[in-house]
Amino acid sequence: MISSRHYLLIGILFVLTGISILFSLLSGSIDLELSVVLSELIEPGSALENQILREIRIPRTLAAFTTGGLLAMSGVVMQVLLRNPLADPYILGISGGAAVGALSAILLGAGSVFFTNAAFAGALFSILLVFGIANKFGQWSVTRLLLTGVVISAGWGAVINILLTTSSTNNVQSMLFWLMGDLSQSQVYLGHYILLAAGLAGGLIISRSLNVLSRGELFAQGLGVNLGMLRITLYFAASVFTATAVTIAGSVGFVGLVIPHILRLLGARDHRILLPCSILLGGSFLVIADSLARTLIAPQQLPVGVVTAVIGVPSFIIILRSTMTK
């Protein structure tokens, strides 16, 4: 049942989204005043401030929000699919496959277009590999899927270590930065926005089934939910969200793990509310984290994944303590 409290939560998250975006546009190695940012947004000029906004900060802010929204939504879906509160978008080895593709492209000295395609191809291969092994002979189960994903993820980790140890010093620095999450060269396009909107629309359409499945498989079967089809749909949807996010920003941790838990603590357990709220809070969280990554040691930049980890670890500990005391 959607209550006024839920609408209040959505309203607060919209305000937080606006504040985070404004904070991102104002922050950086060169500080911009609020009046300058607003004037340049309303009536773009040819000044240096306009160039900074249009070519650097606005694209980076949009990339951070889109990535955060995709990861948070993927985290919600993964936790329902695996019925595991510790599930996150990377648990099934998707980021490992993307990392192998991306690092191989760096090792070969490929351009940015091939780099992105290689990362997505690696993620897609990992998606199909995990699904093919877990679904062999039609013996699909959550446990089989989870174990397969963990093993494949460990295998990708070994390949990543081999690539790091056999690469030159210059390549290793680029590789490590990407592995920790990097938005400095990120770009988002119309297809990314369409995927985010389609994911939300599709999630809202099947929100009743998600609510039922979160209460248990037997309960879902008793209400006539087609578990086989629902599991496959959720797996591929979450995988595509994760693969797309990884190709945009690399491996950014804790967004898909922490954001759904925070929202559930705030009362957003109905997936009609949880899904849109996860996009707003996940996007805002990553925008703020990226702003901090650009400003904490300016003019140098931190990998955004470092900032999300610094914020995410204590946040998750607090969440665990609060849930255990209830």
Image (spheres, helix red, strand yellow):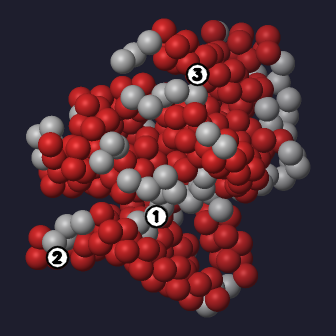
Q: What secondary structure is found at the residue carrying circle 2?
A: helix
The residue carrying mark 3 is 13
Seen in the image, is 184 located left or right of residue 232? right
Q: Label 1 vs label 3: CA separation? A: 27 Å
Q: Residue at x 53, y 74 (%)?
A: 103
| Mark positioned earlier in the residue sequence (1 or 3) | 3
Total labels drawn:
3
The residue carrying mark 1 is 91
- Label 2 Cα neighbours within 10 Å, binned few <14 / some 14-19 / many ≥20: few
Q: Quadrant of residue 193?
A: top left
Q: Position of residue 261 (x, y in %)?
A: 55, 41
Instruction: Name the amino acid, label 3.
Output: Leu
The quadrant in which the C terminus is found is top right
Instruction: Decide which of 103, 254 is in the foreground and name it.
Output: 254
Residue 190, above or below 33? below
Residue 43, above or below 151? above
The residue carrying mark 2 is 136
